[in-house]
Amino acid sequence: MLAGTKEGVLMIESEAHELSEKQMLDAVVLGQDSYKAVIDAIIALAKKAAKDPWELKEKEDEIKRLDQEQVNLKNEIDQNKDEYEKLIDTTTSEIENFLKKASSDNSVQ
């Protein structure tokens, strides 16, 4: 099996233990010459069948709207995260103060 581009061979897969190096090289050259014609035919067909891209203004607006919704959602998540972290810090501080006060109240007794 042989695969490649017009410029060169990319892959050779074979079980050619019985072939000489020259026979193998000749086979690769023949294969490359053969698939170049196929590549040329594919390019010619693509040029003939190609069409200009469609303009989809309504889809562009929808994509922009969805992008903005994603940005808004990310901002909301970031804001909620910040508020949650503040709440944790405040709660932690209050618990520490409570424990200090409880500890000092117990040590007085």
Image (cartoon, rainbow, N blue to C red):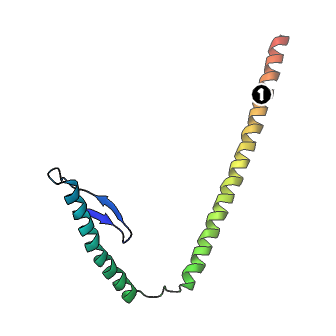
| Observer able to see residue 1 | no
Q: Amino acid at mark 1?
A: Glu
Q: Is residue 85 above or below residue 63?
A: above
Q: State left or right for residue 88 relative to residue 15.
A: right
Residue depicted at 27% across the width and 66% down the height: 29
Q: Position of residue 86 (x, y in %)?
A: 75, 43
Q: State left or right for residue 64 relative to residue 21.
A: right
Q: State left or right for residue 48 relative to residue 24.
A: right
Instruction: Bin the neighbour count of mark 1 within 10 Å (Cα to Cα): few under 14, some 14-19, many 20 and up.
Output: few
Q: Residue furthest right?
A: 108
Image quadrant occupied by the C terminus: top right
Q: Is residue 95 above or below residue 51?
A: above
Frontmost residue, 99 versus 70: 70
Image quadrant occupied by the N terminus: bottom left
Q: Position of residue 74 (x, y in %)?
A: 65, 58
Q: Quadrant of residue 66?
A: bottom right
The residue where tag 1 is placed is: 96
Q: Quadrant of residue 33?
A: bottom left
Q: Position of residue 84 (x, y in %)?
A: 70, 45
Q: Secondary structure at mark 1?
A: helix
Residue depicted at 65% across the width and 64% down the height: 71
Frontmost residue, 105 versus 5: 5
Q: Is residue 63 above or below residue 79?
A: below
Q: Is residue 58 above or below residue 36?
A: below
Residue depicted at 34% across the width and 85% down the height: 45
| Observer able to see residue 11 | yes
Q: Position of residue 49 (x, y in %)?
A: 37, 87
